[in-house]
Amino acid sequence: MDCLFCKISEGVIPAKIVFENERIVAFDDINPQAPTHIQIIPRKHIATVLEVAAEDRELIGEIIQTAAALARERGVADDGFRLVVNTNPAAGQSVYHLHVHLIGGRSLGWPPG
Ligand code: AMP
Ligand code: ZN
């Protein structure tokens, strides 16, 4: 499948990987929007959050826990951080492989643009 994040998961395209196990990969964003900007993805190809199935529930929970662990590791947990899942064009999704942005290390405006 011609999917950028599948290729990162498979090691075909390099990335600065900060965590990985059999189910999940986390890597630094190539165009960081904050001092901490990490992508947490399932190795399984899921195009958007709209395609998450009942059988993926545990996987999604593990992704969220991984994001929280990375937030602590990076020292942004106490100050605060944001997890973002952009979905479809109006939200600016550009890679159609489910990914959770972990963004922190600076003050974040609300509402988002
Ligand atoms: P989204 O717009 O929510 O689909 O987010 C896609 C994210 O992937 C953006 O923040 C990009 O900077 C990031 N990105 C694109 N290509 C790469 C890459 N090769 N390695 C790491 N991050 C990437
Ligand atoms: Zn994929």
Image (spheres, rainbow, N blue to C red):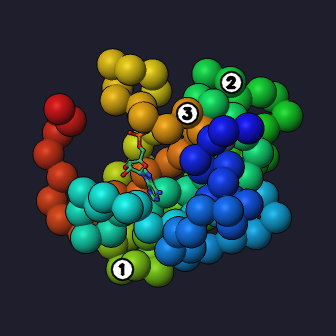
Q: Is residue 89 left or right of residue 20?
A: left
Residue under label 2, please give it.
Answer: 51
* 95 shown above or below 29: above
**How far apart in space, not on screen, are marks 2 and 1 (Cα)?**
32 Å
Name the residue located 63 percent from the left edge and 31 percent from the top edge. 47
CB under 8 Å between callouts 1 and 3? no
Q: SS at mark 2? A: helix
Query: Which one is in front in this view, the residue at disc 1 or the one at disc 3?
Result: 3
Lower position in the chain sequence, tag 1 or tag 3: 1
Q: Is residue 40 visible?
A: yes
**How far apart in space, not on screen, are marks 3 and 2 (Cα)?**
11 Å
Lower position in the chain sequence, tag 3 or tag 2: 2
Residue under label 1, please give it.
Answer: 75
**Image location of residue 83, percent across then percent down:** 42, 49
Name the residue located 14 percent from the left edge and 45 percent from the top edge. 109
* Image quarter of the N terminus: top right
**Three-letter residue code for mark 3:** Tyr
**Image location of residue 34, percent across then percent down:** 24, 63
Q: Residues within 10 Å of mark 3 (few under 14, many from 20)?
A: some
Q: Quadrant of residue 99?
A: top right
Q: Is residue 79 visible?
A: no
Query: Which one is in front in this view, the residue at disc 3 or the one at disc 2?
Result: 3
CB under 8 Å between callouts 2 and 1? no
Disc 3: residue Cβ within 8 A of ligand 2's nearest atom: yes
> Which label sits on residue 96?
3
**How far apart in space, not on screen, are marks 1 and 3 (Cα)?**
29 Å
**Three-letter residue code for mark 2:** Glu
Q: SS at mark 1? A: loop
Q: SS at mark 3? A: loop
Disc 2: residue Cβ within 8 A of ligand 2's nearest atom: no
Name the residue located 82 percent from the left edge and 64 percent from the top edge. 22
Rendering quadrant holding ligand 2: top right
